Image: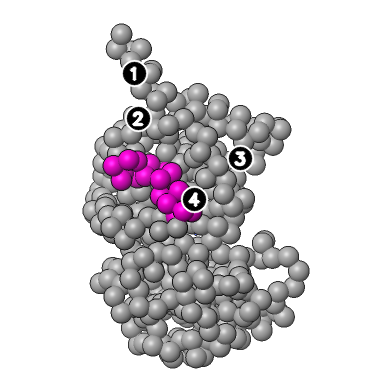
């Protein structure tokens, strides 16, 4: 383990190896990732009950702090917290105090003063959740819901849960991630998770303009020709073109991109016949994926969404396992006295 990985591990885990924050998959080992998947498995059944609630976070306050828009991630975090019986506060930062000039640190101090136990943070700046985790009161958990191009660890874990459900595990699995890897926090976290969990091969398929320099160092092979790249695949993960993060012209046109890298029925036919099709959403039909494939029998895109709730319940309950913030401990002490 590198010094960088060790420091990420120590920030995220308590001395006895329990999850304290969930910021990145860097520094987290196979045993812990498997523990998250197993815990999520146990929560799937809760979502199938008439009364979809367990009391694990009863009395705890979770704040969804989204500095960047989101539908799936924010709503599944909210449902996950509610199914764990937590009280949930959703803050749309674009309409809140930061737009009146309050600094991020001051916003957080105010939210901490409301005795929050957990912040779920999405931010366009890579590293923002990490920064918050370093400054927050000990015992308050920070969960990264996607930061810049850096990481989206709960998305990668819900993807791993979906692969494990459909394929039984990771051994021998050949997985490709296709499209805009350059701007994708999802791809970075997926590559890390797949390597740690023992996939046989992680391949990225994209034009050179949509790949980070030295992409192989993330732990993948590279294929520029999608026709060749689809061969023998067990899992194909499509990515959205992150146009909001593109500076300058990286693509000739969406039409041309679709022709070369869009997942059509023809291209899917080149993969293993039981290859599953995944996408973190939101999908752009006719840009990175053909409708007939997105809605077809090999697509597990909506299973990913359902699994997002179970994974988020797992991560939230593990990060809160026995933790009470120092502030709330003092408060409880005063109440008892
Ligand atoms: C992803 C994200 O926001 O990084 N979506 C998601 O969380 N479901 C991917 C994307 O926006 O394309």
Where residue 30 sits in the image (x, y, percent)? 31, 61
Q: Which mark is residue 145?
A: 4
| SS state under label 1 | helix
Where residue 10 sits in the image (x, y, percent)? 40, 45
Pick whichever of labels 2 and 4 is earlier in the sequence: 4
Determine crowd level at label 4: few under 14, some 14-19, many 20+ residues with C-alpha closer than 10 A: many
Q: Are marks 3 and 1 in contact (CB under 8 Å)?
A: no
**Residue depicted at 50% across the width and 91% down the height:** 228
Q: Are marks 1 and 2 in contact (CB under 8 Å)?
A: yes
Determine crowd level at label 2: few under 14, some 14-19, many 20+ residues with C-alpha closer than 10 A: some
Please name the residue that numbered disc 2 is placed on.
324
Q: Which callout, 2 or 4, points to the residue nearer the camera? A: 2
The residue lying toward the viewer, choosing from 139 and 27, is 27
The residue lying toward the viewer, choosing from 335 and 12, is 12
Pick whichever of labels 1 and 4 is earlier in the sequence: 4
Determine crowd level at label 1: few under 14, some 14-19, many 20+ residues with C-alpha closer than 10 A: few
For residue 109, above or below residue 151: above
Magenta region: 3-25
Q: Is mark 4 within 8 Å of ligand 1?
A: yes
| SS state under label 4 | strand
Q: CA distance from mark 3 to mark 1?
A: 30 Å
Please name the residue that numbered disc 3 is placed on.
93
Using the rendered view, name the quadrant where residue 91 is placed. top right
Q: CA distance from mark 1 to mark 4?
A: 30 Å
| SS state under label 2 | loop
Q: Are marks 2 and 4 in contact (CB under 8 Å)?
A: no
Position of 246 compared to 93: left or right? right
| SS state under label 3 | helix
Pick whichever of labels 4 and 3 is earlier in the sequence: 3
Q: Which mark is residue 332?
A: 1
Residue 295 shows in the view: no
Q: In which quadrant will I find the C terminus?
A: top left
């Amino acid at each position: 383990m590198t010094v960088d990985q060790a420091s990420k591990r120590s920030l995220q885990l308590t001395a006895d190896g329990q999850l304290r924050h969930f910021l990145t998959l860097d520094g987290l080992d196979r045993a812990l990732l498997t523990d998250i998947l197993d815990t999520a498995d146990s929560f799937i059944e809760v979502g199938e009950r008439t009364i979809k609630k367990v009391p694990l976070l009863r009395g705890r306050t979770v704040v969804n702090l989204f500095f960047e828009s989101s539908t799936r991630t924010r709503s599944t975090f909210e449902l996950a917290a509610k199914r764990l019986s937590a009280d949930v506060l959703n803050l749309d930062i674009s309409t809140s105090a930061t737009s009146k000039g309050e600094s991020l640190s001051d916003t957080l101090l105010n939210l901490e003063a409301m005795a929050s136990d957990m912040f779920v943070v999405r931010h366009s700046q890579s590293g923002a959740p990490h920064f918050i985790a370093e400054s927050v009161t000990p015992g308050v958990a920070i969960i990264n819901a996607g930061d810049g191009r850096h990481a989206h660890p709960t998305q990668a874990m819900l993807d791993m849960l979906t692969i494990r459900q459909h394929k039984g595990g990771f051994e021998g699995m050949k997985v490709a991630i296709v499209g805009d890897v350059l701007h994708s926090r999802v791809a970075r976290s997926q590559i890390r998770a797949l390597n740690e969990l023992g996939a046989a091969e992680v391949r990225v398929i994209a034009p050179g303009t949509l790949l980070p320099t030295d992409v192989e160092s993330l732990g993948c092979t590279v294929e520029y020709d999608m026709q060749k790249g689809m061969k023998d695949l067990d899992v194909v993960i499509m990515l959205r073109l992150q146009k909001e993060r593109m500076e300058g012209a990286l693509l000739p046109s969406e039409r041309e991109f679709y022709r070369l890298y869009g997942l059509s029925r023809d291209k899917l036919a080149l993969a293993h016949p039981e290859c599953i099709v995944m996408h973190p959403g939101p999908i752009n039909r006719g840009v990175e994926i053909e409708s007939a494939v997105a809605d077809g029998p090999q697509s597990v895109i909506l299973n990913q969404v359902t699994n997002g709730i179970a994974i988020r319940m797992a991560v939230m309950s593990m990060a809160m396992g026995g933790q009470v913030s120092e502030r709330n401990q003092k408060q409880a002490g005063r109440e008892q006295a």
